[in-house]
Amino acid sequence: MSRGVRHYPGFGWMTVLCLVILYAPLIVVTVYSFNGSTSITTWGGFSLRWYVDVFTGPEAPRFKAAAWNSLTIALIAATVATAIATAAAVAMHRAGGFRGRSLTFALINLPLMVPEIVVAVATLIFFTMVGITTGYMTILIAHITFCIPFAYLPIAARLQGIDEGYEQAARDLYAGRGQAFFLVLLPLMLPGVISGYLLAFIISLDDFIITNFVKGAGMETLPTAIFGSVKQGIKPNIMAISTLMLAVSAVFVTLSYLVNRVGRKSP
């Protein structure tokens, strides 16, 4: 008789250990972001002063500009990446077998398998070779590229669960290919598309390694601005802004999961 993985010796304590290693630092940062003291190790009572400092303190203009860059890049990158991922998913799962299908699938998912530092260096070398000046546009192009597989996976998973009979029925009722896609297939794919968009958005918003390589001088996103401040010493306002980013990330990942879960229950 097969047993669940939870019944194997050591599974319980190993799970607890992994959870502590993963989440204890996040909990410490979150708790001390409400610290009333200027010290990052001594508790001085509950306070929201560092959250106020993020928006009104000396570094507030820098963080606001960086946050605006991060937000606009994430919105554009997620939109373009989701559109490309949707087209790729339809081609991969509705175009039938074609030469190079396996290679195409591997290329789409390559950014997930290659170490991010390698992608960052390769992207910087590419921009240098073609003579593109690093800045806002190079960050945007890089984000669109590595966000595609993150958007593709939930869209493809949703598309695999949709019976081709819906499209065939639409074609039998004299709908063209475009009408069958926009009026039948796309609404059925929508939970996967939304889930992919949310995932791509938060991946772009939180990225640091690739962005740090291709951003150029004078250009900052929120993660690189935080890193620049940390190099001068960890201050309580950094904990506050990190907690805000953590909360936003958690909300978007949860929404992506819930939308994808609803999509799996629908036909």
Image (cartoon, rainbow, N blue to C red):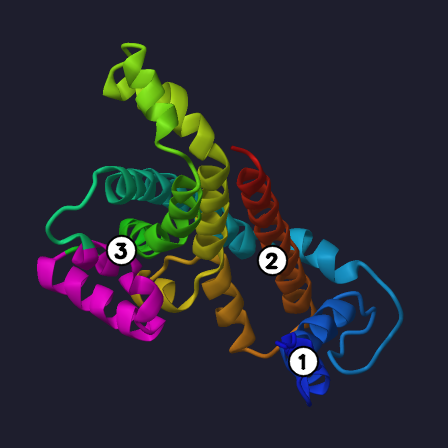
Which x, y percent locates residue 111? 31, 63
- CA gap, disc 1 and disc 2: 26 Å
Span colored in magenta: 102-131
Going from the N terminus, do you reach mark 3 or mark 2 first? 3
The label nearer to you, 3 versus 2, is 3
Which one is nearer the viewer's eye here, 37 or 152?
A: 152
Residue kind at label 2, given as amino acid type: Met
Instruction: Examine the residues drawn in magenta and state their main secondary structure.
Output: helix
Residue kind at label 1, given as amino acid type: Thr
Mark seen at residue 245 = 2
Please identify the residue farthest to the front as the structure is shown. Answer: 1
Q: Residue at x 33, y 60 (%)?
A: 215
| Disc 2: CA contacts within 10 A as few (<14), some (14-19) or many (>=20) | some
Which residue is tagged 3? 108
Residue kind at label 3, given as amino acid type: Ile
Which one is nearer the viewer's eye here, 164 or 208?
A: 164
Which x, y percent locates residue 188? 45, 30
The label nearer to you, 1 versus 3, is 1
